[in-house]
Amino acid sequence: MLSRRSLTLLLASGFAAFSVAAKAADFDFTPEQKGRPHVGVNQKAVDALPKDYKFVRDGYLTVATSPFGAPIVVLATDTRTPVGADPDIATLIAESLGLKLDFLPVAWPDWPLGLTSGKYDAVISNVGVTEARKEKFDFSTYRLGLHGFYVRADSPFTAIGKPEDVAGLKIITGSGTNQEKILLEWDKRNKAAGLRPLELQYYDDQSSNVLALLSGRADAIFNANGPLAYEAAKNGKIRLVGTVNAGWPLKSDVGVTTRKGSGLAPAITIAIDDLIKSGVYADVLKRWGVQAEALEVSETNPPGLPKF
């Protein structure tokens, strides 16, 4: 688990901006989360739980998350409580299973070992489904894995979503990321077709990315959709012009991660699927401004991003 000092540093690095956003975009970053949707027990999901499974804490679903940023998951104003779209989903899953939620903030590199060693029952932290991860973990999908193209609010660009759309553009992305791989492949195809090459730009963090975009140094940002959707809602200075699945040209979505063979995944998938059907799921995504990431159905261990 993150130390109090680490949590404080994480908070200090970004919470001032989050407080502004809560007022501007009506996002709630208080630990009480009075507007959070709730559900009753889903007996179908409960019946699907393995009879021999022992939860980390009796009567609780213990879930780990890495508070990397709004609106997916961030620390609340008390500097301890994770809030955001993923915590809302975690709460609904626990309630569907007839359990209370024990939500633990952890550092991102720590979750795989913590999960396999039995420190928690599941990880709900924007974890993308990949074939390599599926060798060690089971997944129940709950959000589309989306990357978004964002431009200045006054930009002439209205749609970016395929290779030819990026020809000749200056695009900000993350070094060594899936989105960079997508852009490099698109650029390769464009060059082969005689189109102008694109220019990739790299900066240290999202604040630097947005500043570079607003100052005219780049035409667009292409990174994970959630944090950029929050940025757009916060200041109104950037806007979405297109999304691409994180696994392009294949599909790679975000899943609740459980230990391989633990038997939890089918029950969690049933719970999520019924949340989708009931409309509560849509309420959560709307609450955090990530409606574009909605799934039509939850799947257990679908095809994920292939090994490279």
Image (tube, grey):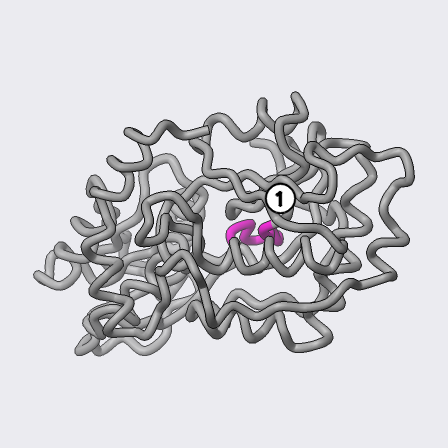
User: How would you rate the neighbour count of disc 1 (Cα within 10 Å): few for under 14, some for 14-19, many for 20 or more?
Assistant: many
Relative placement, left or right, of 294 versus 216 is right
Seen in the picture, residue 225 relative to 184 is either above or below; the reply is: below
Main SS, magenta region, reads loop
- Identify the residue at image location x=28%, y=63%: 231
Disc 1 element: loop
Specify whether residue 202 is in view: no
Relative to 26, residue 114 above or below: above
Above or below for 176 versus 141: above
Relative to 191, is 82 on the left or the right? right
To which residue does mark 1 refer? Answer: 129
From the viewer's side, name the closer residue of 136 and 82.
Answer: 82
Q: Is residue 221 magenta?
A: no
Amino acid at the residue labelled 1: Val
Residue 102 place in picture, x, y as percent: 58, 43
Q: Residue at x 87, y 61 (%)?
A: 44
Task: Using the image as rendered, state which of residue 54 and residue 26 is in the foreground.
Answer: 54
Q: Can residue 31 be seen?
A: yes
Judge by depth and name the residue closer to the eye, 46 or 190.
Answer: 46
Quadrant of residue 228 within the rendered picture? bottom left
Tell me if residue 252 is in the magenta stretch: yes
Residue located 62% across and 68% down the image: 38
Residue 79 image offset from top left, x and y in percent:
32, 45
251 sits left or right of 284 in the view: right
The residue at the far left in this view is: 215
Where residue 225 sits, quadrant-wise, is bottom left
For the C terminus, the quadrant is top right
Residue stretch in magenta: 246-254
Q: Position of residue 83 (x, y in %)?
A: 43, 55
